[in-house]
Amino acid sequence: MSDVLRMGYVHARVTDLARAKDHYANTLGLYPTLEEDGKLYFKGWDEWDHHSVVLEEGGVGAVKFGFKVMDTAGLERIEKKAQTFGDCTVTRMSAGENREVGDGIRVQLDCIGHTFEFYTDMTAVGLEVGTHNPDAFPRHLVGIGAPMLDHALLIGEDIDTAARFFMEVTDFYTTERAQTDLSDEAQTIAYWLSSMQKVHDIALLRGENGKLHHFAFQMRDWNDILHAADLFAMDDVPIDVGPTRHGITRGETIYFFDPAGNRNETFAGGYTSYRDRPTIIWTADQLAKGIFYHARELKESFTSVYT
Amino acid sequence: MSDVLRMGYVHARVTDLARAKDHYANTLGLYPTLEEDGKLYFKGWDEWDHHSVVLEEGGVGAVKFGFKVMDTAGLERIEKKAQTFGDCTVTRMSAGENREVGDGIRVQLDCIGHTFEFYTDMTAVGLEVGTHNPDAFPRHLVGIGAPMLDHALLIGEDIDTAARFFMEVTDFYTTERAQTDLSDEAQTIAYWLSSMQKVHDIALLRGENGKLHHFAFQMRDWNDILHAADLFAMDDVPIDVGPTRHGITRGETIYFFDPAGNRNETFAGGYTSYRDRPTIIWTADQLAKGIFYHARELKESFTSVYT
Amino acid sequence: MSDVLRMGYVHARVTDLARAKDHYANTLGLYPTLEEDGKLYFKGWDEWDHHSVVLEEGGVGAVKFGFKVMDTAGLERIEKKAQTFGDCTVTRMSAGENREVGDGIRVQLDCIGHTFEFYTDMTAVGLEVGTHNPDAFPRHLVGIGAPMLDHALLIGEDIDTAARFFMEVTDFYTTERAQTDLSDEAQTIAYWLSSMQKVHDIALLRGENGKLHHFAFQMRDWNDILHAADLFAMDDVPIDVGPTRHGITRGETIYFFDPAGNRNETFAGGYTSYRDRPTIIWTADQLAKGIFYHARELKESFTSVYT
Amino acid sequence: MSDVLRMGYVHARVTDLARAKDHYANTLGLYPTLEEDGKLYFKGWDEWDHHSVVLEEGGVGAVKFGFKVMDTAGLERIEKKAQTFGDCTVTRMSAGENREVGDGIRVQLDCIGHTFEFYTDMTAVGLEVGTHNPDAFPRHLVGIGAPMLDHALLIGEDIDTAARFFMEVTDFYTTERAQTDLSDEAQTIAYWLSSMQKVHDIALLRGENGKLHHFAFQMRDWNDILHAADLFAMDDVPIDVGPTRHGITRGETIYFFDPAGNRNETFAGGYTSYRDRPTIIWTADQLAKGIFYHARELKESFTSVYT
């Protein structure tokens, strides 16, 4: 079993903090929890930790990703396995290096050029609906009312090593995999990896090191996807693809861009996964259907625009 | 972390196998996988193990519940902790005692009068959509097309001990709890317990030992709940309550009865839970709203009809 | 064909204007357009005429119902046919007798003890989304965001005569009818009557003269019904029945009460009706299923609480 | 008011009857009612007349469209007004010229190169759910279960004259209109015309005479749109655009192609229109948003592929 609870935060760069704040707060409906030192911190209404999104001004793309670990013993297990794994730089990080985040470790995964932080403590600020006889959602949701961060899709050159890192070091498992064909020489094109029961906590796509494809917020269902798309039209948010369904993960989705050009996703549905569930294999000839189940063709921007 | 993957099967009694088969296969849309020795075995289309429901003729109510455990090490951990826990009888069970199920252990939890089996292996028969470039669901779903078993609500006298069993022995955690009030002397009325990220894998309600309140199938969303309710009307399935939403778990639901009188549930929605999520507390004065969020009153049958 | 466009307004009594305003404006999301002389006027965001709901303080129940007629020629046809019909008192009404409503006629239909006004002109105030390149709905909907008034169900003793009035004088047709049985001596229990293509503009149920069963607002779909039910729970609006489906009209529905005790409905779905569509007949033995398709039993309050 | 009840049938050409039958019957779920003389006849489950779709082998595109008129008096009114209108050829047609269709008139509208038939009688075969205590839909729907024909979008050179025909001769009214700009010299790009309360019974787009853009089936809601898109993926039906929402009409939609290449649409939602509703105006600069509310850009095929 994995010691990792979830991708606890995404830390990304944006070109303009004011426009970013408008997008993430007013359109996505995240709750701003702190604005300090040129950084914005947000949480979803159904999250209890201090933040799940950190934005800093200057460029685009991902700075790093935080994974919350259940306890110190788990953190130590991950640290030891990471050190043994090689192909990555493991350092300790101290409480306060990240605002409201406790001690932990930082892993630079050179094979894909991304940085991950593992931590056990973040200041708790509570669910927006409270914990005593709570309502089903806040009475006055803002924008699309995104409840929580869900996952991210990262780009990198050697995703095989990166996937092995997540499987061996953090005990993730592969829910779905896209590969060139079904032969023994097949190359993997992308991995969808899960810590516990979500269809994915992180996904990896072969490409340029250090690039971000998207990070995603979990929505309730297909109807909330429509509502989100309608508000994106009203708020002039550029939609990349959707509303549609993924064949891969079965999720119901919209891809869209924040004002800096980082791709976001609203993701609903999927299935409850289990570690003993058969791994789903997609082959290159059916990959377009796997990615966009309805159109069954890839939009050019989707496989070329990364930040 | 818990070694338990999920409630792998419910084994229940029904008064008439033929009528039960019609209900579970034609209305719920489960796939019959075996009929032998007066027992019916079913799986959902999104399950890969041989069965998740076993029905035997003769009376009503639950015979036992099976929990699938990740591996033998996990099974041994559970066995040891169960032996230490006391208040229960732990025995070994052998492959073949349950059709298609491997070796395991059987726990009689006397405090609530229920029997649980823990196992690591069940014959795999595969997802109905296959594992290579699968469709989002079977092209020809039957009835409401229930994809998989989700959870059960059991009745018993000493649910405090039982909850402690699931927390200490199987490492479940409490997602939500109903209690008489917020004082230090508050008595717990019901527990919702999760192994990993589901809002509940099992729930416990104070009452007569050995009784079954319901077992539930996971549905995709609120629209599938409507479709199920419509088909229950067409197939003359008695609906107890719903469609509605639970305050507790936020799930979208219908309670209904199989032809023997066992209560079933179709359950959708809820939220992705995490072990560090604050436990939600419901107090007796708001419990009706917690159970049926819209009506905010309990239907008499719901708290009196158990099998 | 009928000259009647729609039930343009419901004029009802409430016990407390302030609480009524909170309900109709903040929970239902109607737009207050005027408050004057102890009366409140509201319109839905998808309506363009000045108001569709008028509330006056003092008691409960319906004062009268307004039907908007296409043109003066149509109004004259209705006046003449009403005078010929008998069983009702027909008088002229002048612009200004009803705030923002033009000249028309008033019909007291003694057989059911209800008053109807027919008019061709009401001050137009416009759609909330405008008429040039409009958005799909207002960006900041309030409460459940009820778009428009849909229909009303009235109670009266001689609904046969009243139904004949609507068919002969206003050229409505019967979309569905509930009757004691299929024999030649069957008595009609209720009528659902349509002017054009809605499943009903008005419905009539046998009972005490002058009583109101409910008036209804049109919602988009089953998901908006859930959203409405959730907000009713949050705003402490008493739900009578629902969310559920009607067998009759197929509509998806919630019945609930305003603070004065008048029954409201949120209604979605149904079907596009046509004047040549076969009339649907419901018999008394299946009427519970016709009214509440899922529960298939009548709630006592539903057939006894009228205002 | 209009004497026209609805577009009663579309008569189109297909390249291969067997493949067409598979598409319209097995995927769309229409009921085949007759196969004779190289023609296929279909109806939806919620239609009562003998057919709403006629397909004949040989080419692609529309042969003609039938409009059902309420009664003989209405038919005579239309005949007289059409003869006065000019710009069209009006002939009588006899019962039997179209299978199961009674006497009527045929109008060749040269300004757009399309043929329309007006009739009062078609053999009734009944609703699939019957008329006594009917279920909400057939227990065993086939494919996407399209309930009924909704509307068509026709292409022609002089759509201004054609729109005037439908407004003056058949008393349709314009619900929405796309035009080059808001100036007095603005040219109309497209008309959406309604007989009664639907957002459109027919739409007209400027282009090559005699061409068909699409004909559409009415679906219940956004969720049925998703279900349709999923089945199109499974049945390998080429999707042109969607699922998405139209700004124009607000409808929820998928455009797709039948095996011959004729464009079909599944259409849900929209709004209940009324003859006094303000006409919605879309200007060329916002037309892409009007047509595809989410993407806000036109797909090339959508404005070039006609049959």
Image: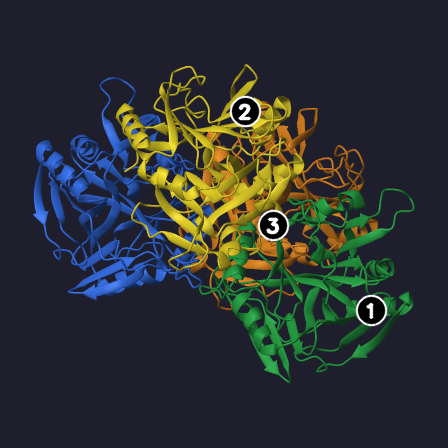
Chain colours: A green, B orange, C blue, D yellow
Comparing B213 with B84, the one in front is: B213
Mark 3 nearby-residue class (10 Å; few <14, some 14–19, many ≥20): few
Residue B89 drawn at (x, y percent): 71, 46
Q: Which residue is mark 2?
A: D55
Q: Are marks 3 and 2 in contact (CB under 8 Å)?
A: no
Give left or right: position of B173 versus D101.
Answer: right
Residue position for label 3: D299
Q: Quadrant of residue D2?
A: top left
Q: Position of residue A271 (x, y in %)?
A: 66, 48
State which chain disc 3 sits on: D
- Give the quarter of the figure containing the C terminus of chain D: top right
What is the chain identity of the residue bearing mark 2? Answer: D
**Circles 3 and 2 on the same chain:** yes
**Residue ranking furthest to the bottom:** A37
- Three-letter code for the amino acid on which mark 2 is drawn: Leu
Closer to the eye: label 3 or 1: 3
Disc number for residue A113:
1
